[in-house]
Image (tube, helix red, strand yellow):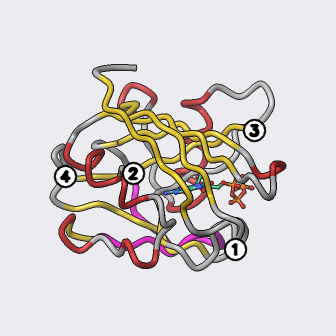
Amino acid sequence: MYSTTLCFVVDGLPARNVLLGMKKNGFGKGKYNGFGGKIEQNEGIKAAVLRELEEECGLIAAEQDLEKVGELDFIFPEQPAWDHDVHIYIVKRWQGGIRETEEMKPEWFPVAAVPYATMWQDDIHWLPQVLQGEKIKGEVQFAADNESVRAVTITAVSSF
Ligand SMILES: Nc1nc2c([nH]c(=O)n2[C@H]2C[C@H](O)[C@@H](COP(=O)(O)OP(=O)(O)OP(=O)(O)O)O2)c(=O)[nH]1
């Protein structure tokens, strides 16, 4: 099982607006998501969050401005090589400007208009809580098409 990061840029918590990116290539192409990717060997989790944030949308943040808000396991019973976990962070302070990159086209959304229909199908089960300021842990099991959700367990946690 490999590990990934996912970072949501918000204007506060509870969030009123969230920055999402339309993924242009790779895993999750055609879906809106936060910014993130695989953690490299010998790389710290927060260092990976900051690297992916800058690579994918141009924003520069500091480790002390990252708040851990979630940990999820993604299980693909029909494609076990895809099993991975994700460390989810929120950032409210950053430097630099947003730019479109080869990987992502960033766009701000009001929290009430987050495009869940164009996102990973599990997101509706936990992202609203995260944008409200809750912290969550859980597991998502995908169905045979590796897209639809077969089962989700999400638990609120008080801290990481
Ligand atoms: N919101 C959401 N994000 C997910 C789900 N599944 C999943 O892998 N992600 C995130 C975690 C990572 O940020 C990203 C996948 O990372 P990846 O490293 O495989 O993608 P990539 O093809 O861009 O590869 P790279 O940047 O590491 O080279 O998608 C999901 O179900 N919901």
Determine whether the residue tagged by mark 2 lies in a helix, strand or loop: strand
For image coordinates 75% across by 38% down, the residue present is 2
Residue 110 x, y percent position in the rendering:
20, 69
Residue 146 x, y percent position in the rendering:
69, 65
Q: Which mark is residue 15?
A: 4
The residue indicated by pointer 1 is: 25
Q: Is residue 99 magenta?
A: yes
Between the C-alphas of marks 3 and 1, the distance is 19 Å
| Residue type, mark 4 in image | Ala
Between the C-alphas of marks 2 and 3, the distance is 20 Å
Answer with mark 1 or mark 4, whichever residue precedes in sequence: 4
The residue indicated by pointer 2 is: 8
For image coordinates 57% across by 51% down, the residue present is 36
Q: Nearer the viewer, residue 52 or 152?
A: 152
| Residue type, mark 3 in image | Tyr
Q: Would you say the beta carbon of the disc 1 residue lies within 8 angstroms of ligand 1? A: yes
Determine whether the residue tagged by mark 4 lies in a helix, strand or loop: loop
The residue indicated by pointer 3 is: 2
Q: Which residues are magenta?
A: 96-108
Determine whether the residue tagged by mark 1 lies in a helix, strand or loop: loop
Residue at the limit of the structure toward the top, as seen here = 159
Answer with mark 1 or mark 2, whichever residue precedes in sequence: 2
